[in-house]
Amino acid sequence: MAESGVAPAGGELDEEFAVPSHVDDVTEQIAAFAAGHGAGGRRVVLITSGGTKVPLESRTVRFLDNFSSGRRGASSAEYFLDAGYAVVFLHRHRSLYPYARMYSGINLLDTLQIKRDCDQVVVNQQVLPNIAKVLQRYQQVKEDGLLLSIEFSTLSEYLHLLKAAAQALSKLGSQAMFYLAAAVSDFYIPASEMPEHKIQSSNGPLQITMEMVPKILSPLVKDWAPRAFVISFKLETDASILLDRARNALDTYSHQAVVANVLDTRRGYVVVVTPETQAELILTDEDVRKEVEIEELIVSNLTAAHSQFMNKHQS
Ligand code: 9Z3
């Protein structure tokens, strides 16, 4: 994916991308969440997850989307919670969600049974493996107020909500981590060039020109949350260019780490690249048999690096 593009100042973002009406409410929610947990000394991670939707018409019938399921973000959220973090989960509407992800693709009606001779509905635990344990953990996380869920669908919503979140979390200094796993579009059609109504197929084949999406990592690192621990993700389909692209991102944005992955092997192999180090994380056959997930290794690597970072830069 392209690395060039002009980073927007806050104002330019507002001009190019429609501001979601609830952005102030979300900012307040995140600020309150951060203040509550920050005061108790708990670290807070903002996870972005899932793909962005890019409309082709302002009264949108069609849009461009991408492959991301949100599994990386959702499973990572669980491991961060296990590691004692509070999590702001900024995710694509209807992408995978922590804990519930384990049962995605299961038809709810196939999991329930009606008890004979009465109106009671019971869960068939065979269809929902480990449901009692998973439900208990989920309810504990909710009760402790450790997971704040924020949704986006479009690229505009993603950009504005990330900016709002970054500014709200910046008060935590080095106690805040940004884990930017969402697959964000590199291209969009500016509002001024977008047709209002549905594009007519009677006009013949469709040709569109898309602009570069501004690289949000630049203002995030420089202006919005300059003391935070920031991790971006680099996705390629050609493994031979992956590490160069990851190093290039680190050089360009001067953040703390890039998690580099290739589309086809992303569930079993990633490289965590920092300015000084390069750690290959690989699931062995034994790990796969035991259902260990790569996100457990990624989160363990990054939480340790975050501790070192905090020691160095006391917030
Ligand atoms: C990733 O690389 C994530 O690991 C995946 C996870 C999206 C591959 P899934 O959601 O997949 O579990 O199905 N995220 C970042 C992808 C990306 O668009 N990165 C940009 C780039 O590579 C920079 S921020 O240029």
Image: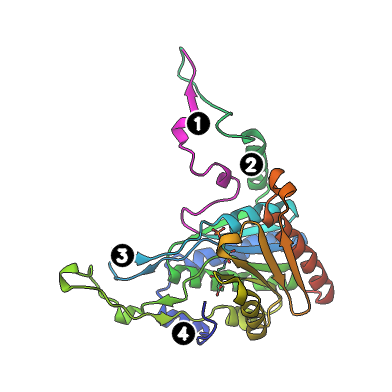
- Residue drawn at x 56%, y 47% as measured from the top left: 101
Residue at left 28%, top 77%? Answer: 207
Q: Which residue is mark 3?
A: 62
Between 108 and 161, the residue placed more toward the observer is 108
Give the residue at mark 4.
12
Disc 4 or 1, which lies upstream in sequence? Answer: 4
At which x and y percent is residue 25?
50, 64
In the figure, residue 170 lies in which quadrant? bottom right
| Residue type, numbered disc 4 | Glu
Q: Which residues are magenta?
A: 92-116
Q: In the picture provided, is 134 more to the left or to the right than 193? A: right
Q: Between disc 1 and disc 3, whose residue precedes?
A: 3
Q: Which mark is residue 111?
A: 1
Instruction: Tell me the SS state at disc 1.
Output: helix
The answer to whether the residues at label 2 and label 4 have Cβ atoms under 8 Å apart is no
Q: CA distance from mark 1 to mark 2?
A: 19 Å
Instruction: Give residue 28's position: percent from left, percent from top.
Output: 56, 65
Q: Quadrant of ligand 1?
A: bottom right
Disc 2 target residue: 139
Element assignment for label 4: helix
Asked if residue 255 is positioned above or below residue 300 in the image, the reply reads: below
Which amino acid does the dot numbered 2 rest on? Answer: Gln
Query: Disc 4 or 3, which lies upstream in sequence?
Result: 4
Disc number lying in front (4 or 3): 3
Q: Quadrant of the C terminus?
A: bottom right
- Amino acid type, mark 3: Arg
Using the numbered discs, state the Cα–Cα distance from disc 3 to disc 2 in whole angstroms: 38 Å
